[in-house]
Image (tube, helix red, strand yellow):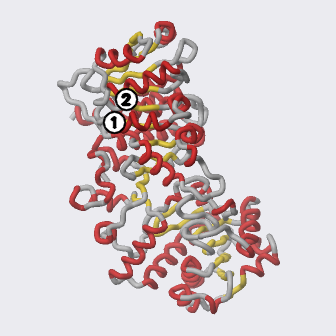
């Protein structure tokens, strides 16, 4: 997928010129319905269901052998097989591993005669020892001590309810054994107990934690959304014979795309020798008051590092006096009210505006926000932080102002701020709501791009197109990091990068900058690395040296 056209290619139309690029990347994320449609189309296309299961089981067996070799303690394997196709994949893996010299046992949940379809065929091909999952419950932790690897093939992504009965008991025992370092776990598709679309156990149930998960054809939301991302361990995607043309021929639209430079690299702004600083992008950031200048300062500097040629901080004279003590490259513009801010945007040849980082929760900032949205409709705007508290009581006023604009708006809340604008879409601890779908609905409702920050950042636009960024380290959760992210987005928007592409690029750069800065980083440490990554991804130095 190429986001140079504002991610217009996310529906996978071959006519838009991006389908070929994406086919090799495998960045599509398929929800349960999309994966089921891909399976069904492949079988209609002529790929036998047994062949798909054989390839899936072989991929699991390959991963299992690698894990056993790495562990280096033995080749004793227990396969936990469920009553559906996930269990069938487990039976195939067991047969292959037994043929490779492993000591393999299969524990089946339910009766063998109750299996149907391809799963019944796979079970019929197994001639090794067959136990019951119920017997493992009776043996408690001792059931797992005799094995070097447990393959979890109980339930796949389509699990409709929480684990119960023997499955729940075994999950609890296995989790305890793994926590004590006694066994490694390899999950088939997703760890049992995790819903493939939400990444959470349904209705507050429990789930097995895995060291590695092997999934098929494409990742599912659960592989990128928390807590699923942690419970999956390392995720590997195996090709099992589903033709790549399924997207074009079956009309399957991905639920989202996993964030990567190939999505938006072509949309990164490029320099030319005749470009002056304002043509490179001119960003205006609203400052907080004299005692709250740090957040806007971080955002302004991030805008510079993202490539903007000029950055201005606008605010009261008292606030700008504090800013001046810290700033060299950033220009300062006194403004005290909404009309002055609108005039300043024209005066400074501004090409993007950022409002929110420690701006203050008051009527003045409210008026400034609405004035920019309503009177500066040709320029992109990023709204962050305090803006969400300002409009908590009347979010529709904000959405209506956004809806009247021609230029894009990007909202960058964290979960708490998201709940202020979208209280009915707030985080659901019971596991019934998908973060991906919550953000899509929020973007549709607000009529703009919404980036919901977190360890599993999700970005969506009003058309339902979405990108998922799950590559950030835990130390990115630090004061000021969100201000840097907002500044990167605004800096890219100031250079006329399409909004969804800018938000996706910024999320990736932000996460990778944190990896480079290391666990002891503060938000300010991100800035230099943001600049390095922006330069590397854009390839400007190599282009102009050549």
Q: Are marks 2 and 1 in contact (CB under 8 Å)?
A: yes
Vertical side of 76 occupied by 445: above or below? above
Residue 50 left/right relative to 170: left
Instruction: State which mark lies toward you, 2 or 1.
Output: 1
The percent coordinates of residue 64 (x first, y second) are 58, 71
Q: Residue at x 31, y 30 (%)?
A: 377
Mark 1 residue element: loop
**In the depicted view, which residue is nearer to us: 426 or 234?**
426
- Marker disc for residue 58: none
Mark 2 residue element: helix
Question: Which image quadrant is residue 122 in?
Answer: bottom right
Vertical side of 339 occupied by 7: above or below? below
Q: Residue at x 50, y 58 (%)?
A: 221
Q: Residue at x 76, y 62 (%)?
A: 176
The percent coordinates of residue 444 (x first, y second) are 42, 48
Q: Residue furthest left?
A: 274
- Within 10 Å of the Cα at label 2, are there few (<14), some (14-19), or many (20+) other Cα atoms? many
Q: Residue at x 57, y 41 (%)?
A: 419
Q: CA distance from mark 2 to mark 1?
A: 8 Å
| Image quadrant in which the C terminus is located | top left
| Image quadrant in which the N terminus is located | bottom left
Residue carrying label 1: 404
The percent coordinates of residue 372 (x first, y second) are 37, 25
- Marker disc for residue 373: 2
Vertical side of 140 occupied by 212: above or below? above
- Within 10 Å of the Cα at label 1, are there few (<14), some (14-19), or many (20+) other Cα atoms? few
Residue 540 left/right relative to 241: left
**In the depicted view, which residue is nearer to us: 32 or 29?**
32
All told, the count of numbered labels is 2
The percent coordinates of residue 144 (x first, y second) are 75, 72
Residue 526 left/right relative to 7: right
Residue 136, visible in the rendered structure: yes
């Amino acid at each position: 997928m190429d986001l140079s056209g504002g991610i217009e290619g996310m529906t996978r139309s071959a006519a838009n010129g991006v389908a070929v690029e994406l086919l090799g990347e495998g960045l599509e994320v398929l929800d349960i319905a999309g994966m089921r449609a891909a399976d069904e189309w492949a079988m209609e296309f002529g790929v036998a269901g047994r062949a798909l299961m054989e390839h899936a089981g072989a991929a699991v067996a390959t991963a299992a052998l690698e894990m056993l070799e790495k562990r280096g303690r033995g080749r004793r394997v227990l396969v936990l097989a469920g009553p559906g196709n996930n269990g069938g994949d487990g039976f195939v893996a067991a047969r292959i591993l037994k043929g490779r010299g492993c000591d393999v046992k299969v524990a089946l949940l339910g009766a063998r005669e109750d299996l149907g379809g391809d799963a019944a065929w796979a079970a019929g091909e197994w001639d090794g020892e067959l136990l019951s999952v119920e017997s493992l419950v009776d043996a408690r932790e001792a059931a797992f001590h005799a094995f070097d690897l447990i393959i979890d093939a109980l339930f796949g992504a389509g699990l409709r309810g929480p684990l119960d009965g023997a499955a729940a008991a075994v999950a609890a025992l296995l989790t305890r054994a793994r926590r004590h370092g006694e066994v490694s776990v390899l999950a088939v598709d997703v760890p049992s107990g995790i819903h493939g679309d939400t990444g959470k156990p349904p209705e507050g149930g429990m789930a097995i934690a895995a060291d590695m998960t092997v999934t098929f054809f494409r990742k599912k939301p659960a592989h990128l959304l928390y807590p699923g991302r942690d419970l999956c361990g390392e995720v590997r995607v195996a090709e099992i014979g589903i033709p790549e043309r399924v997207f074009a021929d079956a009309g399957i639209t991905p639920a989202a795309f996993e964030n990567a430079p190939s999505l938006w690299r072509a949309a990164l702004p490029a320099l030319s020798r005749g470009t002056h600083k304002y043509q490179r992008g001119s960003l205006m950031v609203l400052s907080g008051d004299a005692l709250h200048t740090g957040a806007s300062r971080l955002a302004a500097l991030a805008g510079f590092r993202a490539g903007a040629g000029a950055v201005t901080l606008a605010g009261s004279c008292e606030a700008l006096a504090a800013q001046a003590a810290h700033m060299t490259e950033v220009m300062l513009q006194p403004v005290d009210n909404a009309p002055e801010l609108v005039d300043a945007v024209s005066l400074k040849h501004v090409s993007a505006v950022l409002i929110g980082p420690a701006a203050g929760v008051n009527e003045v900032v409210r008026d400034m926000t609405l004035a920019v949205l309503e009177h500066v409709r040709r320029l992109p705007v990023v709204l962050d932080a305090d803006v969400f508290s300002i409009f908590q009581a009347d979010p529709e006023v904000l959405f209506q102002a956004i809806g009247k604009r021609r230029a894009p708006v990007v909202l960058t809340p964290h979960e708490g701020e998201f709940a202020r604008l979208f209280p009915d879409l707030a985080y659901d601890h019971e596991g019934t709501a998908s973060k991906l779908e919550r953000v899509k609905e929020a973007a549709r409702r607000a009529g703009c791009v919404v980036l919901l920050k977190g360890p599993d950042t999700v970005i969506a636009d009003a058309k339902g197109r979405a990108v998922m960024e799950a590559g950030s380290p835990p130390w990115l959760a630090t004061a000021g990091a969100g201000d840097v992210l907002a500044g990167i987005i605004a800096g890219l928007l100031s250079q006329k990068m399409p909004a969804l592409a800018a938000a996706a690029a910024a999320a990736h750069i932000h996460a990778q900058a944190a990896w480079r800065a290391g666990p002891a980083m503060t938000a300010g440490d991100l800035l230099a690395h943001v600049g390095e990554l922006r330069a590397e991804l854009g390839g400007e130095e190599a282009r102009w040296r050549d």
